[in-house]
Structure formats: C-alpha cells, structure tokens
C-alpha cells in the first residue's frame, strides 16, 4: 500500500501547484467552472489578502506515488471565533481524488493543526470571510456551477460522513426566471413604499462608488445586514477596500442598485452577468492567451442569458417596509433590457425564511445545496 505524504505549502511555486490542483482534478467535467487563477493566488497569499489581519492559515498538499492527490487549507478566523465565542479551526480549498485515505489524511492534518493551536472544533468548507466560497456541494451536481461557489464531485460528502462529520449549516441556491414584466405584486409594493415611506432607488456613478465612499458604505451595510448569518465576521476597512477594488470597480453600474431613505443607504443589490460559460473557455481560469476576450464579452456586451445575484442586503427595519421590492423592481427592468432570461441566487441559508420567501412571487426552483460540516476535536 502506497504511503500518503502531507506536505505544507512553503513557497510561491508550491502555492501555484496547490491552486492548479483544482483545474487538473476537474478537467473535462461538464459542470465545474474554473475560478480565476489570479484571484485564487491573491486570496491565498498573505500579501494579497487583508483577512490575515484577523486570520492565520496554512495550506497542505497530499502526495501519493509522487503525484499530488489532494489539498486543503487550514484557517483560524480569530475575529469570528470571538464573535461566536468558539475555538474553531476551519478547512477550505478542500479537494481530493476518490480515495478515503487521502481525504482522511488531509482532514486529520487540519484537525491536528487546530488542536495544536488550542481549537476545540473544526468546521468547513468555510473560507477566511463570508464573501469567500462556503459549503460543500451535496445536491445539484449536474447544474453548471458559478465562480462564486464551490463545486465538487458527489463522493466528497460521502467521505465527510465516513470521517464522522455532521451537518452544521446548509445553504441553497435557486434559479429564477426573469419575468417579461415586473410582477404586479412587486410593482404595487414598490409604488406603496415610495409614497408611504419616501424610499427611492439610486443608481450610483463610478465616482460615487470608488472615490466618494459609497462602495465602502455598501459593505458597511453588508456588515450590518449579514452580522447574524452563520460564521460571519465583520469586514475590516482593509477588507472592504479590497472588495470594492475586486467587485465594485468592475461592476456594470446598471446592475447595482441602492435603496435610499433620504441620504441614508438602507439597501443594496449587486449583480453581475454570469461568467460561468466564459470561464470554461479559459485555460485554467487564466486571462492569457485568450481568456480575457471571453470575459470581456460578458462584462462589456453581456453575451450571456444568465445573471448572478451576487449580494443583496436590506437593513432589518426596512425589510418589513418592502425595500426589497424596490431592488427587484429596478433590477428586473435592467435584466430585461440586457436580455437576461435567468438569475442565479447566491447561497442562502435554508433557515432564512424571510429571504427565501421573497422568491414566491417569481418562477423559481432550487438547483443546489451546499453544506458546512462540523466535528468536535
């Protein structure tokens, strides 16, 4: 029987090998979507990720018969542990061939690493912060993935259960049919909200978002609206700056909606045209030689029939006032003008009935489920 060797990542060359493993493992798979290689490197390198202000991490590769057969990241988010009063080590970037000995060796490495640092439980897949990919796919293996979520083979959850891991939290994602016209329910609520509460839609300029601080205000609002979600840790100013630079600077501003109460931002929606099919045409998520062209066609000319609902948030006191309806009323009109037929939601907690109920007025179906696993150490 061949021995499995676990090697810590100690150089940039090894980190590139760590990142590359995903592309090699899923090459030829019809549903996996390559992540942007540059984004993966930026997130995992200490110099590129401000999350290391509150996190520590180490990455490990599994080698068998001289070949890489798995990888895992071990992460401790001290800010989240303080917020939730836990001593938790997280695992993420967890991929492996269908060999229980490989997955077991990788998980045990994270478990031992966490124990050595005084942790009492392990959970994952969870990244550094809430905007990183979360959860292991347990339903929807035959649906085209997105760049914002984890995709994995069906054998992954089987390996987790064999190791004694239990469910900690589930997220679901829906595919929503973009209606030809705004549904009467949304239109009526929107009109009522405008008249009764004086709320209004605001479309941002690039200057407002990047130079005048409104991009930061969107993520300040995210901090407030997401603060009670599973595993969430407050974003720091440096983390927010990176998110503004990574997402807001590139966004099509017609697909970003703010909801204002006077001069106060009380809700937002950030959506992007789907890059899934374009990314599958790149060479392992790289811009060169021609990956940039496929991505540019989506970003500039919206050459896709699908839009990703990336981030949506409304202050709690404005949800009951119907502020969500204003977001959907505006975005549906924008989606139709661009010819989008489908919208894919981001992961939503299965217990978040308030968020899930908002789709009842639209034609929608659940297409995926992701699970976070946990285990006491």
Image (spheres, helix red, strand yellow):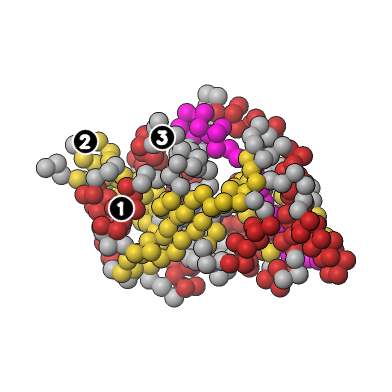
Q: Position of residue 203 (x, y in %)?
A: 79, 51
**Can the viewer see residue 22?**
yes
Which tag, 2 or 3, sits closer to the chain's start?
A: 3
What residue is pinned by disc 2? 66
Q: Residues within 10 Å of mark 3 (few under 14, many from 20)?
A: few
**Can the viewer see residue 244?**
no
Label ID, residue 29: 3
Residue plotted at (37% across, 52% down): 73
Kind of element beneath mark 2? loop
Q: Position of residue 227 (x, y in %)?
A: 57, 68
Q: Quadrant of the N terminus?
A: top left
Residue plotted at (44% across, 64% down): 169
Select label 1 or label 2 by which is in front. 1
**Furthest-right residue in view?**
195
In the image, 233 versus 158, the foreground residue is: 158
What residue is pinned by disc 1? 158
Indicate the quadrant where residue 194 lies: bottom right
- Asked if residue 228 lies left or right of residue 336, the reply is left
Q: Which residues are magenta?
A: 261-286
Q: Tell me the CA gap for discs 2 and 3.
A: 24 Å
Kind of element beneath mark 3? loop
Residue plotted at (72% across, 71% down): 320
Select label 2 or label 3 by which is in front. 3
- Residues at circles 1 and 3 in contact by the CB criterion of under 8 Å: no
């Amino acid at each position: 029987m061949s021995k499995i060797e676990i090697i810590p990542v100690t150089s940039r060359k090894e980190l590139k090998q760590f990142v590359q493993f995903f592309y090699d493992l899923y090459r030829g798979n019809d549903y996996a979507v390559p992540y942007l290689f540059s984004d993966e490197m930026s997130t995992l390198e200490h110099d590129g990720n401000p999350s290391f202000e509150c996190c520590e991490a180490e990455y490990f590769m599994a080698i068998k018969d001289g070949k890489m057969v798995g990888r895992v990241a071990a992460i401790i988010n001290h800010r989240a542990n303080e917020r939730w009063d836990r001593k938790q080590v997280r695992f993420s970037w967890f991929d492996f061939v269908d060999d229980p000995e490989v997955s077991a060796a990788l998980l045990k490495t994270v478990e031992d690493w966490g124990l050595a640092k005084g942790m009492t439980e392990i959970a994952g897949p969870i990244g550094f912060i809430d905007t990183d990919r979360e959860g292991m796919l347990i339903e929807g293996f035959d649906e085209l993935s997105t760049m914002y979520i984890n995709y994995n083979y069906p054998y992954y959850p089987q390996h987790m259960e064999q190791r004694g891991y239990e469910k900690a939290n589930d997220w679901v994602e829906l595919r929503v049919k973009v209606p030809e016209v705004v549904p009467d329910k949304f239109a009526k609520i929107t009109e009522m909200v405008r008249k009764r509460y004086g709320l209004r839609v605001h479309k941002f300029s690039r200057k407002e978002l990047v130079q005048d601080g409104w991009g930061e205000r969107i993520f300040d609002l995210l901090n407030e609206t997401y603060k009670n979600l599973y595993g969430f840790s407050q974003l720091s100013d440096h983390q927010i700056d990176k998110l503004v630079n990574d997402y807001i600077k590139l966004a099509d501003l017609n697909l970003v909606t703010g909801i204002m109460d006077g001069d106060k931002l009380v809700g937002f929606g950030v959506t992007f045209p789907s890059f899934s099919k374009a990314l599958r045409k790149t060479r392992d998520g790289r811009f060169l030689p021609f990956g940039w062209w496929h991505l540019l066609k989506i970003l500039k000319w919206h050459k896709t029939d699908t839009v990703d609902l990336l981030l949506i948030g409304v202050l709690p006191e404005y949800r009951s006032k119907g502020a969500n309806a204003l977001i959907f009323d505006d975005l549906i009109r924008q989606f139709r003008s661009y010819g989008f037929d489908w919208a894919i939601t981001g992961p939503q907690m299965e217990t978040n009935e308030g968020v899930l109920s908002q789709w009842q007025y639209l034609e929608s179906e659940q297409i995926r489920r992701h699970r976070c696993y946990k285990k006491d150490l």
